Image (spheres, helix red, strand yellow):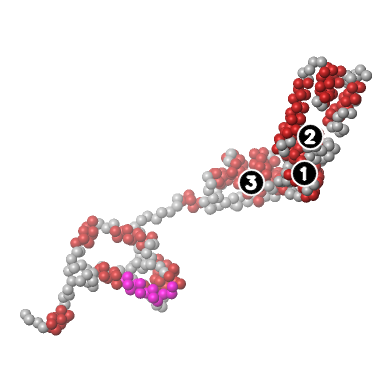
């Protein structure tokens, strides 16, 4: 059949049959693409600032990614094998039917704006909550016991057990003194230091200190925990009040003395230490407090004098070896090293003299020699090092000499003072001891030793 070109175009355009194309309008993929384009076209009507507030929803009106949407998607994918087989058979264009869309009473714009059709102001969350949905998974809830975590029906024993397990538990329900004491006793019986401390913090906050101290006085375990806790947090005021209530005078004095660590100014610290001297310390601690005060007093004097000498620049040792740190608040051995380094040759009468420090603080000979050797060796003062070694060694060997006259001559020649003094004492030679007294330094330990022997009534001198 012959047709003109115009007739052929009219035939194909007017026919109810269409040629196959990959963009078939009945294709579901095309329908989905069209829907996607329609949804995306709505973005032109929405401000850029509101893009973060948009919520994606499915055709059923449920937010995409929500729990209910995920459950339905899972349910839809878990259909029977028979249903999956039917879907596979829908591969011909003649039998392929368009997937039905569930009827929805909400417009797309309402989902973006959080409201239903025009004229209704129902929120999106309210609208979705009205949509019937079948539950495909059991609801996962807490055990019934967990709902009692924040309740007020816990007994003291139950509360302590929960505290021990690290669970949240309020103590505010324990209002009466009896309940609080019972709670404390339960904590002590559990033998858990953390639980005891937690309960003590609660009691410290809710009880007056007089009542708290009175109750803890008869509960020594809890008392020790509170004392340790107050020391750790540095609550010196409450700690002093506690020791004062318990009449623990020595611990009270030690706690008061510990406060000097918080005083940075040297003069104020010295005055504070002076107030500690009369406190009821033990004999050993009292001597320590006195030495601490005396040492800081000396350090303040030495520091002021040496700072002046260093700034003046007239002392050689300060020019060659500038000080790297202050001497204030340094330990006794460090102060002795400092004195041996900068003031080794000074007379004993000065506060900065190493010999004066040795005598004042009763530093042992071995400690003194060791510290002096370290200081002089650092300065490369080898002559002083040799003298320290020689005097110490010779004194031991001179004592081994049997002839008395030879021993005295050698000891006098090498200035082994202790050998001369001890030999004169053994000989009970008062005149020779008096003569040797003039050869030692005034105010030295050797002079004091000689005076003590001369005034002793237990020695019967020959002359």
Crowdedness near tag 3: few (<14), some (14–19) or many (≥20) residues, C-alpha within 10 Å: many
Could you tell me which quadrant the C terminus lies in?
Answer: top right
User: Reading the chain from its start, which is encountered first: label 2 or label 3?
Assistant: 3
**Tag 2 near tag 3, CB within 8 Å:** no
User: Reading the chain from its start, which is encountered first: label 3 or label 1?
Assistant: 3
Q: Where does label 2 land, which residue?
A: 358
- Quadrant of residue 413 in the image? top right
Picture residue at 23% right of the left edge, 56% below the top: 81
**The furthest residue to the right:** 463
Q: Where does label 3 land, which residue?
A: 200
Front in this rendered view, residue 36 or 20: 20
Where's residue 128, x and y in %?
39, 67
**The furthest residue to the top:** 403
In the image, residue 37 lies in the stretch drawn in magenta: yes
Crowdedness near tag 2: few (<14), some (14–19) or many (≥20) residues, C-alpha within 10 Å: some
Front in this rendered view, residue 155 or 450: 450
Q: Report the span colored magenta.
A: 35-48
Q: Where does label 1 land, which residue?
A: 316
Mark 2 vs mark 1, foreground winner is 1
Where's residue 80, x and y in %?
25, 57
């Amino acid at each position: 059949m012959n047709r003109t070109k115009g007739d052929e175009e009219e035939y194909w355009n007017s026919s109810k049959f269409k040629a196959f194309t990959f963009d078939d309008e009945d294709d579901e993929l095309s329908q989905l693409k069209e829907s996607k384009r329609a949804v995306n076209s709505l973005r032109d009507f929405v401000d850029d600032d509101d893009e973060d507030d948009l919520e994606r929803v499915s055709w059923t009106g449920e937010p995409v990614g929500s729990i209910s949407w995920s459950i339905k998607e899972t349910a839809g994918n878990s259909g029977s094998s028979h249903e999956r087989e039917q879907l596979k058979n829908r591969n011909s264009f003649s039998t392929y039917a368009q997937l039905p869309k569930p009827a929805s009473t909400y417009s797309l714009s309402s989902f973006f704006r959080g409201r239903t059709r025009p004229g209704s102001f129902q929120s999106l969350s309210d609208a979705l909550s009205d949509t019937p949905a079948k539950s495909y998974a059991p609801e996962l809830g807490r055990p019934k016991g967990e709902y009692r975590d924040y309740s007020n029906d816990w007994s003291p024993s139950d509360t302590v057990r929960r505290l021990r397990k690290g669970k949240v538990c309020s103590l505010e329900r324990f209002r009466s003194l009896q309940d609080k004491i019972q709670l404390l006793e339960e904590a002590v019986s559990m033998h858990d230091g953390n639980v005891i401390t937690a309960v003590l913090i609660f009691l410290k906050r809710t009880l007056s200190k007089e009542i708290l101290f009175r109750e803890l006085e008869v509960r020594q375990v809890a008392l020790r925990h509170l004392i340790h806790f107050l020391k750790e947090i540095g609550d010196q005021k409450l700690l002093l009040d506690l020791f004062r209530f318990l009449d623990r005078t020595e611990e009270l004095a030690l706690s008061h003395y510990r406060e000097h660590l918080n005083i940075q100014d040297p003069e104020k610290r010295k005055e504070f230490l002076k107030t500690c001297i009369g406190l009821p310390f033990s004999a050993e601690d009292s001597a320590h407090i006195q030495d601490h005060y005396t040492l800081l007093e000396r350090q303040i004097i030495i520091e002021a004098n040496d700072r002046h000498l260093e700034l003046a620049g007239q002392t050689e040792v300060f020019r060659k070896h500038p000080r790297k740190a202050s001497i204030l608040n340094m330990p006794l051995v460090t102060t002795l090293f400092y004195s041996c380094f900068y003031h080794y040759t000074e007379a004993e009468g000065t506060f900065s003299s190493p010999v004066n420090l040795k005598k004042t603080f009763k530093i042992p000979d071995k400690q003194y020699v060791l510290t002096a050797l370290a200081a002089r060796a650092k300065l490369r003062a080898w002559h002083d090092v040799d003298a320290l070694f020689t005097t110490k060694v010779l004194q031991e060997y001179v004592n081994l000499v049997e002839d008395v006259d030879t021993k005295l001559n050698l000891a006098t020649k090498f200035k082994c003072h202790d050998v001369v003094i001890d030999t004169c004492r053994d000989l009970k030679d008062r005149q020779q001891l008096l003569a040797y007294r003039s050869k030692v330094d005034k105010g030295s330990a050797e002079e004091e030793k000689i005076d003590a022997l001369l005034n002793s009534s237990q020695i019967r001198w020959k002359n």
